[in-house]
């Protein structure tokens, strides 16, 4: 069984108790195999999303991917979907490729990059945070 410490994970995994007032990162040691499928970040959809973004944005500074599908389990529209485990993805992207672009154009850029994957994998929703390096240093 693959065991990874928090620092060895390919992307951040937020614990079930994530809230706006209490951001708790997962325990120091946790197996990806122990997570339910709708919380994992090593599935084919998220792996493909990671690959297509990193190839399309070679100067990316930071990419954090979260699988928020567990939050939407049983919601309308998910029951008939072919993708129930990686249907809701949250991306936090920091790249100077966003310089000079307003927020809608940044999001259009990412949706254009993800277009084929969204159709192929039946991704229901993507939540985006897109910042330049300077903008991320301000927060």
Image: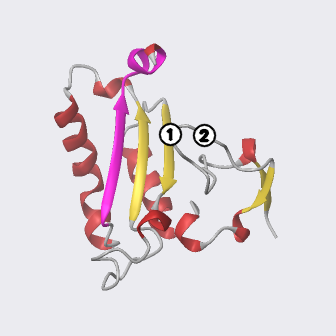
Vertical relation: 136 (above or below) 110: above
Is residue 135 part of the magenta span, yes or no? yes
The 10 Å Cα crowd at callout 1, few under 14, some 14 to 19, many 20 or more, is: few
The answer to whether mark 2 and mark 1 are in CB contact below 8 A is: yes
Please give left or right for residue 105 compared with residue 44 in the image. Answer: left
Please give left or right for residue 5 compared with residue 117 in the image. Answer: right
Mark 2 to mark 1 CA distance (whole Å): 7 Å
Q: Quadrant of residue 35?
A: bottom right
The 10 Å Cα crowd at callout 2, few under 14, some 14 to 19, many 20 or more, is: few
Please state the extent of the stretch shown in magenta in the rendering. 124-137
Q: Could you say where residue 113 lies in the image, as x and y percent from the top left?
A: 28, 50
Vertical relation: 47 (above or below) 23: below
Label 1 SS: loop
User: What residue lies at 48% left-to-right and 16% top-to-bottom?
Assistant: 137
Toward the viewer: 15 or 138?
15
Is residue 129 part of the magenta span, yes or no? yes
Circle 1 residue: 20
Q: Could you say where residue 39 lies in the image, as x and y percent from the top left?
A: 56, 64
Which quadrant of the rendered structure holds the N terminus? Answer: bottom right
Q: Could you say where residue 116 lies in the image, as x and y percent from the top left?
A: 26, 63
């Amino acid at each position: 069984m693959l065991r990874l410490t928090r620092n060895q994970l390919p992307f951040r995994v937020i614990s079930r108790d994530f809230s706006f007032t209490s951001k708790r990162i997962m325990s120091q040691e946790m197996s990806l195999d122990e997570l339910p499928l709708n919380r994992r970040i090593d599935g084919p959809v998220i792996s493909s999303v990671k690959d297509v973004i990193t190839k399309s944005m070679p100067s990316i500074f930071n990419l954090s991917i979260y699988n928020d599908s567990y939050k939407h389990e049983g919601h309308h529209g998910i029951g008939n979907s072919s993708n129930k485990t990686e249907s809701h993805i949250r991306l936090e992207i920091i790249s100077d490729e966003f310089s000079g672009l307003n927020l809608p154009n940044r999001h259009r850029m990412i949706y254009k990059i993800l277009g084929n994957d969204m159709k192929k994998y039946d991704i229901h929703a993507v939540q985006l945070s897109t910042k330049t390096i300077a903008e991320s240093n301000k927060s």
